[in-house]
Amino acid sequence: MAYDYSRYLRNDKFPHIWCPGCTYGIVLKAIIRAIDKAGLKQDDTAIVSGIGCASRLPGYVDFNTLHTTHGRAIAFATGIKMVKPDKNVLVITGDGDATAIGGNHFIHACRRNIDITVVVFNNYIYGMTGGQYSPTTPTGAVATTMPYGNVDPQFNILELAKGAGATFIARGTAYHAAGIDNLVVEAIKHKGLSVVEIINACPTTYGRRNKFKSPTDMLLWMKDHFLPVTAFEKLPPEKTAGKLPMGILYREEKPEYTEMYYSMVKRVQEGGK
């Protein structure tokens, strides 16, 4: 099926700012396909971001969009959902924006299970601000602020989300682009806090410092290091070392925050306790 991407875009905002070889354009198209498949109306959908390369995405799409401050996208999105619980709310965020400066907002949104879809663009680095290491930078990887190799242990975003209470978690990669839109569709349909991690390539500030000769090499690395969850679960531990599963990794039905909140408000207004 062919999609008319242009009707979802602010075409006057192009060309975009992303570097040659950056995979964010691939994921932008997948998110548009997902929104189209899910049947979301543009006027009923808000897309919120913070600061960073990924956070420039809402400026390119023709929805109700907010480009907010660093790490605060989920806080703004929570406010929208609380005031307009009937609207669709998506957050576009990066690994640093979501799990470093925005980490507290991230874990408490997961804990509340508020009906927001959070798409985390994970490229293992702070790209826009100069290549500093982030919570997801692999141990041993080189960054401007870890020139001799990162000594920090690496965050697993989805394990963090699950532990904090998110009721839908999924992972895709820019290499496996054809599957991203279906993951985002399922996340949008899920009632509760959904987190979709998309592994992306940053050839400029991560790839050059970490022995990737080209953006193609980074995509091929994704091909080799991520397996469909059904295949991953069938393999012995020695075959999955250094690899991660992708697809829908966890889904659970639990009470959603705004429904519980407005149920309580109604009860109090009617004189209940």
Image (tube, grey):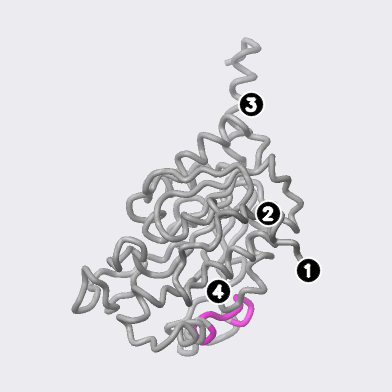
Of residue 233 and residue 166, the one placed in the foreground of this image is 166
User: Picture quarter containing residue 264?
Assistant: top right
Looking at the image, how many numbered discs can be counted on the residues? 4
Against 266, residue 155 (above or below) is: below
- Whether residues under marks 4 and 2 lie with C-beta atoms below 8 angstroms apart, the answer is no
- Whether residues under marks 3 and 1 lie with C-beta atoms below 8 angstroms apart, the answer is no
**Mark number for residue 140?**
none
Q: Is residue 231 left or right of residue 100?
A: right
Kind of residue at disc 4: Ala
**Mark number for residue 8?**
2
Instruction: Give the SS element for disc 3.
Output: helix
Residue at figure coordinates x 62%, y 10% from the top left = 271
- Label 2 vs 1, first from the N-terminus: 1
Residue at figure coordinates x 32%, y 82% from the top left = 210
* Label 4 neighbour load within 10 Å: few <14, some 14-19, many 20+: many
Kind of residue at disc 3: Ser
Residue 115 visible at all: no
Instruction: Give the SS element for disc 2.
Output: helix
- Percent from the top left, x then y, of residue 216? 49, 86
Instruction: Give the SS element for disc 1.
Output: loop
For the magenta stretch, what is the residue range?
223-231
Q: CA distance from mark 4 to mark 1?
A: 19 Å
- Percent from the top left, x then y, of residue 142? 27, 77
Residue at figure coordinates x 24%, y 74% from the top left = 150
Of residue 217 and residue 260, the one placed in the foreground of this image is 217
Q: Which residue lies under the disc numbered 3? A: 263
Q: Which residue lies under the disc numbered 1? A: 2
